[in-house]
Amino acid sequence: MRILDFDGVPSHTGRVEFRINGKWGSVCKKKISASAGKMVCITLGYLDGVIKNPNDDAYKGFCKSFLGKNYCGPDYDPIFY
């Protein structure tokens, strides 16, 4: 597991990715829950974690515009979960 920032560099803020059979893929923005996001962050060594789901009305378009950057990653990246 890893979290990548808008430049694709490991970070504490960004998109969640998993490695399967040597290939990295992201988590579908429609299906990750708050508890799953917290578990990912704790597993990576953080004390807590928060998922900003772009499908929630409060976060519409969030990953494409967080701090003026696109944290969603390239459209061609595979989605594993």
Image (cartoon, grey):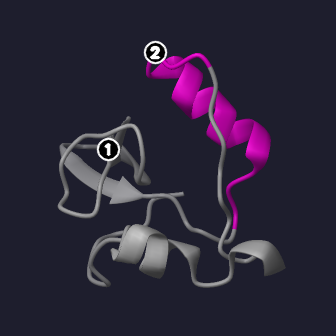
Q: Quadrant of the C terminus?
A: bottom right
**Residue 60, position in %: x, y?**
68, 83
Give left or right: position of 17 versus 58: left
Q: Quadrant of residue 53?
A: bottom right
Labels 2 and 1: the sequence-earlier one: 1
Q: Nearer the viewer, mark 2 or mark 1?
A: 2
Q: CA distance from mark 2 to mark 1?
A: 21 Å
**Residue 77, position in %: x, y?**
28, 72
Mark 2 is surrounded, within 10 Å at the Cα level, by few (under 14), some (14 to 19) or many (20 or more) other residues, namely: few
The residue type indicated by label 2 comes to Gly
Number of marks in the rendered image = 2
What residue is pinned by disc 1? 20
**Residue 78, position in %: x, y?**
33, 69
The residue type indicated by label 1 comes to Ile
Q: Is residue 42 magenta?
A: yes
Q: Nearer the viewer, residue 53 or 29?
A: 53
Give left or right: position of 21 versus 16: left
Q: Does dot 1 land on a helix, a strand or a loop?
A: strand
Residue range in magenta is: 31-47
Which residue is located at x 46 percent, y 70 percent? 66
Whether 46 is drawn above or below 56: the answer is above
Q: Does dot 2 land on a helix, a strand or a loop?
A: loop
Q: Is residue 27 magenta?
A: no
Which residue is located at x 76 percent, y 46 percent? 34
What residue is pinned by disc 2? 45
